Image (cartoon, rainbow, N blue to C red):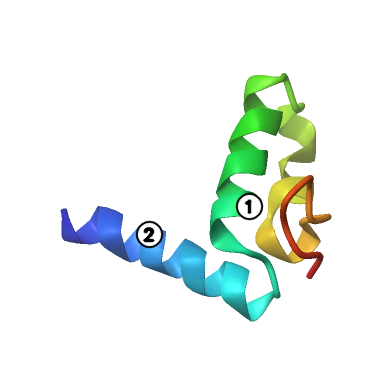
């Protein structure tokens, strides 16, 4: 319960600090992972590297 909420709150806060809309970030990131984004390039999906995707704001 509390640990999961802390992770989500941290993710939302990190997105906001990097100028990224949290819902767009999560949606786009999950879509990219489901589409086969390579594990060796997961750093590209971190909020501070997020390119904005179709609905987000670039950080």
Q: Residue 1, relative to residue 18: is it above or below? A: above
Q: Which residue, given by chain and number where applicable, does mark 1 sit on? A: 25
> Residue sitting at 49 percent across and 62 percent down?
11
Q: Residue 28, relative to residue 43: is it above or below? A: above
Please state the total of marks drawn on the protein image.
2
Residue 20 image offset from top left, x and y in percent: 68, 66
- Nearer the camera: disc 2 or disc 1: 1
Q: Which residue, given by chain and number where applicable, does mark 2 sit on? A: 7
> Residue sitting at 49 percent across and 66 percent down?
12
Q: Which residue is at the far front?
A: 55
Residue 55's label in the rendered image is none
Residue in the foreground of this view, choosing between 57 and 48: 57
> Residue sitting at 67 percent across and 41 percent down?
28
Proximity of marks 2 and 1: CB atoms separated by less than 8 Å: no
Q: Residues within 10 Å of mark 1 (few under 14, many from 20)?
A: many
Residue 18 vs residue 2: left or right?
A: right
Quadrant location of residue 16? Answer: bottom right
Q: Which residue is at the far bottom?
A: 17
Residue in the foreground of this view, choosing between 5 and 52: 52
Quadrant location of residue 5? Answer: bottom left
Q: Residue 14, relative to residue 25: is it above or below? A: below
Residue 23 image offset from top left, x and y in percent: 54, 54
Instruction: Report helix, strand or loop for mark 1.
Output: helix
Residue 39 image offset from top left, x and y in percent: 71, 30
User: How far, Cα to Cα, is label 2 from label 1?
Assistant: 15 Å
Q: Residues within 10 Å of mark 2 (few under 14, many from 20)?
A: few
Q: Earlier in the sequence, mark 2 or mark 1?
A: 2
Instruction: Report helix, strand or loop for mark 2.
Output: helix
> Residue sitting at 72 percent across and 41 percent down?
42
Quadrant location of residue 33? Answer: top right
Q: Which residue is at the far left?
A: 1
- Image quarter where the C terminus lies is bottom right
């Amino acid at each position: 319960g509390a640990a999961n909420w802390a992770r989500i709150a941290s993710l939302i806060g990190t997105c906001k600090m990097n100028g990224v809309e949290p819902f767009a970030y999560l949606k786009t990131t999950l879509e990219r992972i489901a589409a086969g984004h390579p594990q060796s390039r997961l750093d590209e999906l971190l909020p501070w590297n997020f390119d904005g995707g179709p609905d987000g704001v670039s950080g």
